[in-house]
Amino acid sequence: MNALHGSRRGPGRLAVLLLALVTLLGIGAGTAPAAPDGERVRVPASAVDAVAAMQPSWNLGNTLDAIPDETSWGNPPATRELLHTIRAQGFRSVRIPVTWTDHHAAGAPYTIDAAWLDRVEQVVDWALAEGLYVVLNVHHDSWQWIAKMATDHDQVRARFDALWTQIAHRFRDAPRTLLFESVNEPQFDNATDAQKAQFLNELNTSFHSIVRGSGGRNANRLLVLPTQGCTPSQPLMDDLAATIGALHDRNLVATVHYYSWYPFSVNIAGGTHYDATARKDLDEAFARMHDTFVARGIPVYLGEYGLLSWPDHFHPDRVERGEALKYLEHLGYRARVAGVTTALWDPFAYLNRATLQWRDPALFAWIASSWTTRSATASFDKVFVPRSRPVTDQSLTLDLNGTRFRGLWHGGTRLGAGRDYTLDGSRLTLTARALTRLTRDRAYGVHATLQARFTGGLPWVIDVITQDTPVLADATGTTGSFTVPTQFRGDVLATLHATYADGGNAGPADWTPYQEFNKAFSPDYPNGAIVLTPDFLNTLRDGQPATLVFHFYSGATVTYRVTRSGGSVTGTVVP
């Protein structure tokens, strides 16, 4: 969804990157030859080498893990064609999350429904036949009933053990390209930290014993063990390292997940940019994975990664696109340096399961490129040219990531160095002359899409936008429905700062003045409005005005005041 609206548009992001996607990566749905049968994929003897051979990986999310059934969360049933597409697009493994809760008896002997187990086996077999490694797990059961282990220990253990006994027996003769993962994001309610560590060690150890004792290829199958919550914190990884060490088994794999620094991942608490704090969080997480496991000969499978609330093709982007691309590029690089295999979490957001096409091919190009190389980025992917003032030079800072700058293009036209732009070290400046030409009639919105090209990786795409400070208007409504009339004037909403006169924070996230995008507020660009959600409005103090400061990506801010009186809401512009 593009939030920018203008009278004219230059070549779009998809057009300028699609060629790079095809030529640089050589990927195309339906064009790859049939993959080899899983039985003939040679699994390296070393667990480290085997997990490395699984890079990159993809999650069949919101499918067999959906509750209660495969199609309950909106995806169509998985098909062999889907898994062929994944293999053809360059993935070497697939994680197949499975929620078993609604498909086995809730009491002893906890028998799995035969039809469900057959369906799981069918999807696994399709993936193996496509030459994919497969990771099969126990998924949302973690919070549905395993979390009750502190208060229902014996039944949870019996149920968990029964599930893995049946799964291990069904797949005991499957090729070693099939891996088992004990449990997804394990959590335990009403337990101390020490108890949580004990419970997870107990589950992982029991899982290991059951699978190894079931014979067949399970005797040396790669087994994947998680930290609590699949969180990559040092104490939790130390706990897992201790468990793995005590098992004395060279065919074990550690797994964690990574969804970036939380404020950036959901755009809350001012996390509007992939800044130094977010980068540091990622750098340190992958350094911990390497030092705790990889450096000790224990492979790491990053079972899920992405952003918690992006991409979302059905709501306004809460994470700015260019900032998300920086994160994905950085993650791919750090994973390679750390020796970590990465599995993209895809509930529906990346691959359209109905068409088997990427919803955003240019986005996928960045993900795929990060598997093998680095791409340069810049301080932002937009240049704002105020309409109400004379056009002036505008600058961005390049992050070359080991590449060299080759030039700037508008469509097929190369811009002139010195005339249209200058480069001083890493500072790229678009001249007033070029911006005047590119913005033409200066109507609000995107006028040109430029490519900064480099000696390696993908081009960095820059939108040239005419904007002015947005204009808001007074409004009335209710706690169930309230919108702020807004002339966006080419600008893009970044965040909302909400406080009371006494300095207290206003909104559901009372620990920060910067509220969560799309949860407390949301832009409605087509209808010229900013929506304040019922979640936000119902938390406001009755009769106490809240001062709202809307921040936009151009740097503009607009102040607004909202007062709730019972179920009524009034909003006024603050001069």
Image (tube, rainbow, N blue to C red):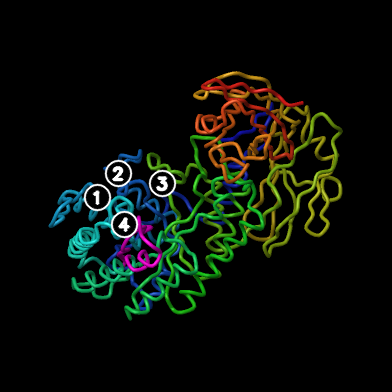
Numbered circles on residues, count: 4
Amino acid bearing label 3: Pro
* Label 2 sits on residue: 67
Q: In this view, does 281 lie to the left or right of 468?
A: left
Q: Which residue is nearer to you in this view: 483 or 192?
A: 192
SS at mark 3? Answer: loop
Magenta part of the chain: 177-199
| Structural distance between the alpha carbons of marks 2 and 4 | 22 Å
- Work out whether mark 1 precedes mark 4 in sequence or the reverse, and give the earlier one: 1
Residue at the extreme left = 109
| Structural distance between the alpha carbons of marks 1 and 4 | 23 Å
Within-10-Å neighbours for mark 2: few <14, some 14–19, many 20+: some
Picture quadrant of residue 257: bottom left
* Label 3 sits on residue: 347
Q: Residue 418 at what x, y percent from top left? A: 86, 50
Q: Which of marks 2 and 3 is in front?
A: 2
SS at mark 1? Answer: helix
* Label 4 sits on residue: 127
Vertical position of residue 157 compared to residue 394: above or below: below
Q: Which residue is nearer to you in this view: 20 or 74?
A: 74
